Image: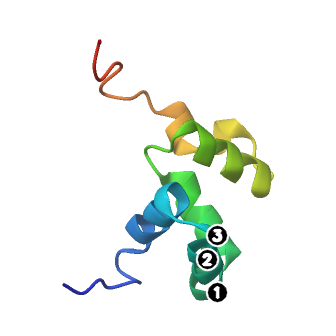
Amino acid sequence: MSIDYERHARFVIERVLTRGNWNDWQELRKYYGLDKIKNEALHLRYLDKVTFSFCHTFFNIPKEKFRCYNTEPSIRQLWNF
């Protein structure tokens, strides 16, 4: 399977931000640049708390500007154990 890195940039950026390691982050920065990463992060529907805090702090963007901050999740509680 092959991924078109330009066409699926948002997906690739989201996956590296949420699941990648430091080397993945470095490669992401080289390939897309910080402006593209920032723009795509602002439009993501969901970011976990750690990734959201990282993006908010690293890019110095108010939390309210992120789509994931303003969009209510469709599933409030996944499992009740």
Left or right: where 53 falls relative to 1: right
- Please tell me the numbered disc located at residue 30: 1
- Please tell me the numbered disc located at residue 22: 3
- Residue lying at the far top in this picture: please name it: 81
| Residue shown at the point (35%, 74%) measured from the top left | 8
Q: Quadrant of the N terminus?
A: bottom left
User: Picture coordinates of residue 22 (x, y %)?
Assistant: 64, 69
Q: Report, in whole angstroms, how far the alpha carbon at label 2 lies from the one at label 1.
A: 11 Å
Q: Could you tell me how many numbered marks the image carries?
A: 3
Left or right: where 58 falls relative to 37: right
- Please tell me the numbered disc located at residue 6: none
- Nearer the N terminus, badge 2 or badge 1? 2
Q: Report, in whole angstroms, how far the alpha carbon at label 1 lies from the one at label 3.
A: 13 Å
Coloration of the structure image: rainbow
**Residue highlighted by disc 2:** 23
Label 3 residue SS: helix
Front-most of 67 and 2? 2
- Nearer the N terminus, badge 1 or badge 3? 3
Q: Amino acid at mark 3?
A: Trp
Q: Residues within 10 Å of mark 2 (few under 14, many from 20)?
A: few
Q: Residues within 10 Å of mark 1 (few under 14, many from 20)?
A: few
Give the vertical position of 4 relative to 68 (above or below): below
Q: Residues within 10 Å of mark 3 (few under 14, many from 20)?
A: few
| Residue shown at the point (78%, 48%) measured from the top left | 57
Circle nearer the viewer, 1 or 3: 3
User: Picture coordinates of residue 15 (x, y %)?
Assistant: 43, 62
User: Picture coordinates of residue 41 (x, y %)?
Assistant: 56, 57
Label 1 residue SS: helix
Circle nearer the viewer, 2 or 1: 2
